[in-house]
Image: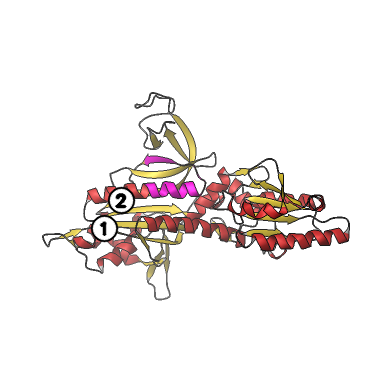
Amino acid sequence: MFQSQLFAKIKKEAPKDEPSVNARFLTRGGYVDKLMSGAYSFLPLGFIVLKKIENIIREEMRKIGGQEILMPALHPKELWMETGRWESVDDLYKLKDRQSRELALGPTHEEVITDIIRKHSFSYKDLPFALYQIQTKFRDELRSKSGLLRGREFIMKDLYSFHTGEEDRKKYYETVKKAYLKIFKRCGLPVLVAEASGGVFSKEVSHEFQVPTDAGEDVVVFCQNGHYSKNIEIADKKSGENCSSCGIALKEVKSIEAGNIFTLGTKFSAQMKANFTDENGNEKPMIMGCYGIGLGRIMGSVVEVHNDEKGIIWPKELAPFHIHLIALESKDKKTSKKIFAEAGKIYKKLSESASVLYDDRNGVSAGQKFAEADLIGSYWRVVISEKTMAQRKVEIKKRSDRTAKMVGIKGLEKISNL
């Protein structure tokens, strides 16, 4: 990608109505555009990162047997009436069409997935199975703020599993928990797996995947040795009290809930008659579980955790470009021509094995190019200038490093794999 052709332009100033770090850097860096409170457009750079998060999630879902589907965002009132949630869900967007049919914009898809399942005949031999989607959700959020961390329209991966019994569901629940930890690790996010209430779904505890950061709205009480971790709303211990397992003082930390997993049991299957036939020929309601991750929330959380005063520091797997190649002009036009000619060759070579953003712009100062590269936050920065050309070298630096080093042009392709 040539930076001169990149659609979104870098903004020097952050929007005055965006106090959160993720919204300020993502907007300034040309990743997102705010349409209104709680609704953002993903611009080319943001869309690249979003798709990388999506691909990581897909890879890990496939490994645990998840089969991808796509369900409608528009739901008939009748489905939600079956489960009693038409009136009980506060943040449900409701509307009427021109024929006065009442509809909802889906904030979640338990009713729809259960409706799909009950239209088919299943025996115990067909179970277990798991279906997931990556889709836009809508919630009438009163406190829509914090950039991508809390929105009215957002993208979520929701997985639903179906089982003949609790033992099998619990086993798969632990499998998903491990898959989630892999997803967050690949996205560069440290997480605390915190116990939380099962809410309206179940009397059993659920688990939240909490990212420690001051930008978070949740609070987790936890043991640094991993023996205790609970959302403060259900915690039976307070910060400063000793852990029952190892004796060290518990701590509390603000955090962002980036994912959660729930036991559904037969709450939806019994109400909506999503049954299977057991070994004795009897019909029984399926045992269900649900597992969610917010893609935009992952992106926002990564920016909240990985940044400095200059901008975003993307983890390797999420960086929009592996390499940001910068060509610096010389005061001498002939020398500049040689620099850009060499930079073009380097760009072509590196692009064979890595994603490269090439700052090919003329008339832009070195200071501006460096500042914009730091704000964008690609994994590697490679600089070619009159100084480096004289030594047949380039300057390379990881975005996360403080200092740069010089390497030979011929050996430059090695960073494609670093």
The residue pinned by badge 2 equals 172
For residue 126, above or below residue 254: below
Q: Disc 1 on helix, strand or loop?
A: loop
- At 32% from the left and 42% from the top, the residue drawn is 205
Give percent across and percent down for residue 357.
66, 59
Q: Few, some or many C-alpha atoms within 10 Å of disc 2 (few <14, some 14-19, many ≥20)?
A: many
Kindly identify the amino acid type of the residue bearing the numbered disc 2: Tyr
Which residue is at 61% across, 44% downward? 307
Report which quarter residue 236 is drawn in. top left
Spatial separation of the CA atoms under disc 1 and disc 2: 9 Å
**Which numbered dot is residue 317?**
none
Q: x, y percentage for residue 399?
A: 65, 46
Measured as percent of width and height from the top left, residue 270 is found at: 22, 58
Is residue 15 visible in this depiction of the protein?
A: no
Q: Which mark is residue 128?
A: 1
The quadrant of the picture occupied by the N terminus is bottom right
- Relative to the observer, which residue lies in front, 263 or 50? 50
Mark 1 vs 2, N-terminal side: 1
Kind of element beneath mark 2: helix
Who is closer to the viewer here, 81 or 74? 74
- Spot the residue most to the right: 332
**Mark 1 Cα-neighbour bin, 10 Å: few <14, some 14–19, many ≥20:** some
Q: Does residue 27 show up magenta in the picture? A: no
User: On the rendered structure, is 213 left or right of 112?
Assistant: right
Query: Residue 113 location, x and y as percent?
Result: 33, 63
Residues at circles 1 and 2 in contact by the CB criterion of under 8 Å = yes
Judged left or right of residue 369, residue 59 is: left
Q: Which colouring convention does the figure follow?
A: secondary structure
Please indicate, yes or no, whether residue 219 appears anywhere in the rendered image: yes
Inspect the image, locate mark 1, and give the three-letter code of the amino acid beneath it: Pro
The magenta segment is: 178-195
Position above or below: 371 against 359: above
